[in-house]
Amino acid sequence: MTETVKSTLPDKERRIAGEALQDTLVDLLGLSLIGKQAHWTVVGPRFRSIHLQLDEIVSSARAFSDTVAERAAALGVPPDGRPATVAASFSLPGPEDGWLRDTEAIELMATSLEQSIGRLRHRIEATEEADPVTQDLLITITAELEKQRWMFDAENWPRSQ
Amino acid sequence: MTETVKSTLPDKERRIAGEALQDTLVDLLGLSLIGKQAHWTVVGPRFRSIHLQLDEIVSSARAFSDTVAERAAALGVPPDGRPATVAASFSLPGPEDGWLRDTEAIELMATSLEQSIGRLRHRIEATEEADPVTQDLLITITAELEKQRWMFDAENWPRSQ
Amino acid sequence: MTETVKSTLPDKERRIAGEALQDTLVDLLGLSLIGKQAHWTVVGPRFRSIHLQLDEIVSSARAFSDTVAERAAALGVPPDGRPATVAASFSLPGPEDGWLRDTEAIELMATSLEQSIGRLRHRIEATEEADPVTQDLLITITAELEKQRWMFDAENWPRSQ
Amino acid sequence: MTETVKSTLPDKERRIAGEALQDTLVDLLGLSLIGKQAHWTVVGPRFRSIHLQLDEIVSSARAFSDTVAERAAALGVPPDGRPATVAASFSLPGPEDGWLRDTEAIELMATSLEQSIGRLRHRIEATEEADPVTQDLLITITAELEKQRWMFDAENWPRSQ
Amino acid sequence: MTETVKSTLPDKERRIAGEALQDTLVDLLGLSLIGKQAHWTVVGPRFRSIHLQLDEIVSSARAFSDTVAERAAALGVPPDGRPATVAASFSLPGPEDGWLRDTEAIELMATSLEQSIGRLRHRIEATEEADPVTQDLLITITAELEKQRWMFDAENWPRSQ
Amino acid sequence: MTETVKSTLPDKERRIAGEALQDTLVDLLGLSLIGKQAHWTVVGPRFRSIHLQLDEIVSSARAFSDTVAERAAALGVPPDGRPATVAASFSLPGPEDGWLRDTEAIELMATSLEQSIGRLRHRIEATEEADPVTQDLLITITAELEKQRWMFDAENWPRSQ
Amino acid sequence: MTETVKSTLPDKERRIAGEALQDTLVDLLGLSLIGKQAHWTVVGPRFRSIHLQLDEIVSSARAFSDTVAERAAALGVPPDGRPATVAASFSLPGPEDGWLRDTEAIELMATSLEQSIGRLRHRIEATEEADPVTQDLLITITAELEKQRWMFDAENWPRSQ
Amino acid sequence: MTETVKSTLPDKERRIAGEALQDTLVDLLGLSLIGKQAHWTVVGPRFRSIHLQLDEIVSSARAFSDTVAERAAALGVPPDGRPATVAASFSLPGPEDGWLRDTEAIELMATSLEQSIGRLRHRIEATEEADPVTQDLLITITAELEKQRWMFDAENWPRSQ
Amino acid sequence: MTETVKSTLPDKERRIAGEALQDTLVDLLGLSLIGKQAHWTVVGPRFRSIHLQLDEIVSSARAFSDTVAERAAALGVPPDGRPATVAASFSLPGPEDGWLRDTEAIELMATSLEQSIGRLRHRIEATEEADPVTQDLLITITAELEKQRWMFDAENWPRSQ
Amino acid sequence: MTETVKSTLPDKERRIAGEALQDTLVDLLGLSLIGKQAHWTVVGPRFRSIHLQLDEIVSSARAFSDTVAERAAALGVPPDGRPATVAASFSLPGPEDGWLRDTEAIELMATSLEQSIGRLRHRIEATEEADPVTQDLLITITAELEKQRWMFDAENWPRSQ
Amino acid sequence: MTETVKSTLPDKERRIAGEALQDTLVDLLGLSLIGKQAHWTVVGPRFRSIHLQLDEIVSSARAFSDTVAERAAALGVPPDGRPATVAASFSLPGPEDGWLRDTEAIELMATSLEQSIGRLRHRIEATEEADPVTQDLLITITAELEKQRWMFDAENWPRSQ
Amino acid sequence: MTETVKSTLPDKERRIAGEALQDTLVDLLGLSLIGKQAHWTVVGPRFRSIHLQLDEIVSSARAFSDTVAERAAALGVPPDGRPATVAASFSLPGPEDGWLRDTEAIELMATSLEQSIGRLRHRIEATEEADPVTQDLLITITAELEKQRWMFDAENWPRSQ
């Protein structure tokens, strides 16, 4: 059934945009899962502040994952956000099993966000010619993740030196 | 750091409740992922109706997964909702790769919900002695999933005969 | 078409829960109708206060009747809330034809609520083994009706001595 | 106590308006009950769409029944919306016992609404001289029920040919 | 400047509609002032209930007075709601100086509303030919005031016998 | 497919009501388009005030056009609001190409509204016997447009002398 | 019944505060009536802007009149806001009969507000010793009316030179 | 008066952006009109679902038409959205006269949206150099219309094969 | 740790303001507790009206207690609202054990409020020189409590004679 | 007046449930008072975070205390939440006089909540037979307090080792 | 144009109040700018908590600056809040260039607020005779800034010793 | 501490984006201050309309200044929005001391906005290569300021010729 939904893009452009969106989808679903994991298992003096901050990332990641997946569908590319796919493709660092110190949670999120941003910037370049509509969405996501990353980085000071 | 957060339950009761909660967490996170997957890839004459209905399940599953994981933490048991854990432990049927016919989406969700309810009813029994507070939460989740299952089953008629 | 929607309960349990829900449905629909009747026909110095109070019961009774009927459907039991069924099965005391004195309205509602609570308590016992999910719903309804009954009873003082 | 609340209309006009309102009250309460019945027991591929649509009729019917009954009271005529009265006086077609096919639910509601509209149009004529205030309320109700009827009729196509 | 705003009605019809609206304006502004007066000065066991009920009449009367005056302006007739005009033209019974017993407040409002309704019904007849748009507004106001009157009358029982 | 949706009116009455509604639909859609046109192109010292005022007319005209078209459908008459129909049938004065002086915008809207009201008053008469429900809707629309016309006329003073 | 509600102030202080509040009540009710009168009858190029601005004064005046009258009641002094009292005691300038030019409306409101502020400032002094709670309320009202006066005065420029 | 509002763009760029915006305005106004037409005249088993879905497109098209026209004005180009202009310039396929089968409505909207997207993609290219601010707006509109198109296309399956 | 938070007032003024605030805190916390006690235990024909009225006092008392305590903290004075302190320092009359007649509840609240107002008026005087900011807060609280007292007193008539 | 409000429970069951509810009421009112006390007097680097967190406990404790007391009343048992009763019966640890270090506030609340939970679990057992409706309420309260306790405990790490 | 807006105060009083308001305006605008500066540049473990807290001060300072400037205008004194004026007149301590440690941010705000409060208290005295309305506004601002100062001071502990 | 927060951009790109953002920050803070200044000091017949319009610009400018400054921080560049920096760097025309004629206010804002837009368009070009995420934000701001400029320019007609 792969050809079911027609695309408004030619094949090549659809493939480029489709890959960028699928990879972004996995990153965002993964971030939403590890964000929640840290939200639940964080301990330490800064528990409450980080507990709340993590929910904001999860909320952003969930909302963007929906937009990204529906954009793929709109281009005739069925997105894949099933548990096994996310687990197999997600490559950003995440928390260990068990409780998580607050300082580790902050450093972990700053690092994961930084890596996801680097990947997004490559996709912004890759989609510029293929589909400026998809590119615009990736730019919007990058702006939000860079804002979130700054907050964790500012909070990480002076340990991150 | 497993002993970090104190429990209000004795060891045995905590273990029983903790297992029930962890298993429920995986089911709910898995349901939220496959619900979204079907939300994005469903095609057919009933697209819009099912697209919207699936978002209600995802919304319920996400909200309950948060309550369940925080209840585990409240009992001193760190929950595990990381991508690899969900992928490894989730055993309910989910959609195939690619687009999904509307009739298949309905049957799939009815089946997955039915199986998750059967598992929840066992956990309701298992936690009755160990922790009535956890049991009460599992009862609330079951009521909601049974309502959702009925709607898909009613919609599945007369094909499910 | 009685077997149309599958049940998540075995036959015997489904029958017990189904009966408890059907009987509760009739009581709640009946209460919503006699509550409105009194809301419209009450006269006397306490008119406004009781007129408003009755709408709160009607609102609760309508909301619970929906939950109860959908719970029956979720268990594969088609509920019956048609006019003839309600009229034939409803056995709680209701207002006479015509205008209704405020003192009588209060006494009537206190009595009807008290009787409906007694019946609910029997159903709570009856469903404990058969279906704790249904039992939990009946407990919730009882809590609300007992609160409403207290308010009418407190208002009925000192006449109720 | 029938003369308890004074009327702002002479006897004859009050009787005409009172009868029109009482008959409308029974139709609306009956519609709200059979609408809910179908809301709970409908099955088939269009389940969700009709389940939601039926709640809109129930909501309209309940709101109008309150306005109609309070208008009767305002004219010094105590309305009668008790279970036995509704069951005895309600003459519009309603669903059978048990589950209800979606196509039957649609046809049933289209028919019941059509009949109730025909009756309302007679009451609009009957009250024109007696009480233009009551007439205006009946016109408002007719507009809403005709809109609801059209929707079911449009949905019934091409079966209704 | 009397001809400043053009009318959409011929002269005779404008005069009839204009008079009906001006008289209604005075009644409504007067009702809003005596309603507030009673709201502030009522005493007795039913203080709170009547205090709140009176504010609902004031709120209705103020909103309708605005609609009525703007309708007059829309017909090219400048309305007159100045203090001296209201005082000179208002002829419905109002409260005495000083505190007001709750039973008197109820009787007073029931009487004032009854008289204002009688006057409105004459204006409904008078405007039927001249301007059905104005007539429709007067019908709407009558419906609301008759509802309010019933409530005070029901509350007045059994003293009003 | 013209007979697809059944009517609740006999043929002759349906034709009269259907024509009144179709003509009103064109007037309202036309008003919403020229209102927006003036909203975008108005210039002059009163720009902001008129820019906002025009959006209120557009909002009313759009809402009423929906009600009018759905009322036609409810009577079994398919409405026609397609671009070519609106352009061909719309006969009220509208703005020229390009920017529009604020004084001209005001005079234009006052004139267009005045003409549309004159047409509505004829339809109110025409539908009185055929369908009082349709008539009541036309009365409501007239009340709103007359209010809007007054505001532009009052604003047009003293130029309109 | 003048002594019905007890005062929390000694006789002399109650008399001083009571007079200040009664006089303020008349000014505010009068302002609300002439503000509405101008709201309805204003014509001219600034119609819409002033029409809206006048409703803000009316809204403030109505809200403060309620607070002022309830404060009098709270001090055991029954307030008097009946039509005849307002007409007899209100001494601020108001609009003439008929339509009102926009420039006159602005000048009129600026003048009426200025005079009412002068009177409030005397009452602020008069109540300083007698009742600082009443004084604080009068200060709050003055702040709002001075803000409203400034806006009309700024709008009146350069005519007010 | 064509030069009335100054532009922030040089002549050539203004002309390119102005044309792209004017053409988009006509497409969006046309879509809003044919979307409503289908909303009113659709019949068939999927009536309710499509009736609601069409209102979402109309809502988007109306909001974007406003933004597009105001952007043209902001660039010193008076937009043209008058009935005759829309009728003359609109070239997307729309519904026939009379009732519209649900399957045809879906296919029609999928086709119209697809064509409008193709046109928008050309304008995105055309405005890249001339005005990136206008381009960004066109990208946003394309994203929304592509999402709407996917939904109709997904719903059209398997008929669209 | 008493000197932990710096004060913006000199020692003497801080002491005066601190005492006034601490005493007011105890009165308000006490009022909120006895208000709730009466809210729960009141019986009699006026039950509902008083039950609701008491919650308004509790709500005011709780909100003001927070403002008062935070004002003390802002002046460098740690407030004391612990159970033992409230019980030891609270001196206003409160309800007996068990159920409370409605007439007694009204009289009790009128008396307690009257006494608390007398105490507040002394503190208003005491803080005038020491801290006008604290004085202004006490004036605001007095205005609200005097309004509440009036309502109970008006309701108490004619028994309070 | 102890027998004033009838109970829906037999004597023995009412006594058991009544005691459980009265003891819970004292714990919750005490928690709300010491929570506020800590809210006002906490100092240290985590001031803002804990200040806000404490208000959430106070809010929960106040809401539950109302539900618990009204449940006692609904069972015919007058609750006792007067200042002296709370002070005499409250046995959970609370803050000392004066300012409170943030680390102490956290430890204090974790301890108080832990003890209150232990007591609630005994009452859950005690009421299982006597009144499942009361038991269900106690389970709900326990779930919330255990969640709050976990948050303070997680925040207390690593000091709590 | 300095005399353009009339004052309701004599010259001397206007000058005193005008100076107090102008000086307060500069302090508040300055506080809003340095509060935002710290909001953007703060780093350290308490980043999130302080980042949010600073926005509350900015929000208060902006709202009060508007009220203060409009009060000056209402007294016929044109306020001056232009960039150069704020820069030249603002004398409270603010952050250095670049990133700002969280501990420094807290100490800085506590100090700036303390100084601004000292200046406000002088203006409260200075305006007591000249204009109690202006004084009342300054008292309100002082209450809010003292509350904000306490929170930073409490957070600064034990470093501030 | 300049290197405290890491950047997601290389040095050169960070410098380019950082400068564009810092310059935009100063323009927006400056616009918000002169917008408020004109909001407070404007006089003339169009006072109210412009007073309100200016607050919309201030609101936009404040919101964008926050987004711009946080974007700089997200790129590791500490923004500078302190009073002295704004005063020294702000170069757009602003109002003189004292009252401001309404015609001057309009011309002033049209000019300032036009100049700020010209500067933004240069920064859009400058950041295209360096950081498309920053560029996208500048495009969004330009779109809003161009819309605001058009409104003032349209209002300035025919004086701006």
Image (cartoon, coloured by chain):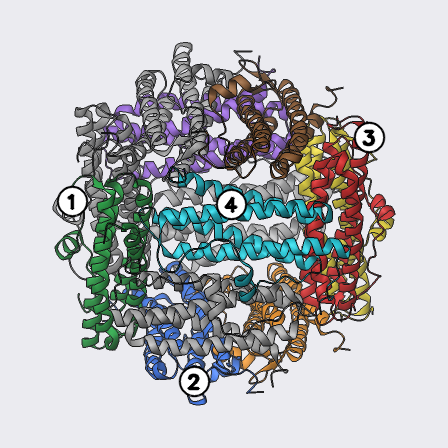
Chain colours: A orange, B blue, C green, F purple, G brown, I cyan, K red, L yellow
Q: Is residue G11 left or right of residue K83?
A: left
Q: Nearer the viewer, mark 2 or mark 1?
A: 1
**Rendering coords of residue F25 (x, y %):** 40, 32
- Quadrant (top left/top right/bottom left/bottom right) for the C terminus of chain L: top right
Numbered disc in front, either 1 or 4: 4
Marks 2 and 1 belong to one chain: no
User: Mark 4, chain letter?
Assistant: I
Does residue G74 appear to the left or right of C49 in the view shown? Answer: right
Residue kind at label 1, given as amino acid type? Glu
Residue under mark 1: which chain is it in?
A: C
CA gap between label 1 and label 4 equals 46 Å
**Residue B19's disc number:** 2
Where residue C51 appears, x then y in whole percent?
30, 43
Residue of label 1: C96
The chain that hosts pointer 2 is B
How far apart marks 2 and 3 lie (CA) works out to: 79 Å
Question: Can residue K109 be seen here?
Answer: yes
What is the tally of numbered marks visible in this picture?
4
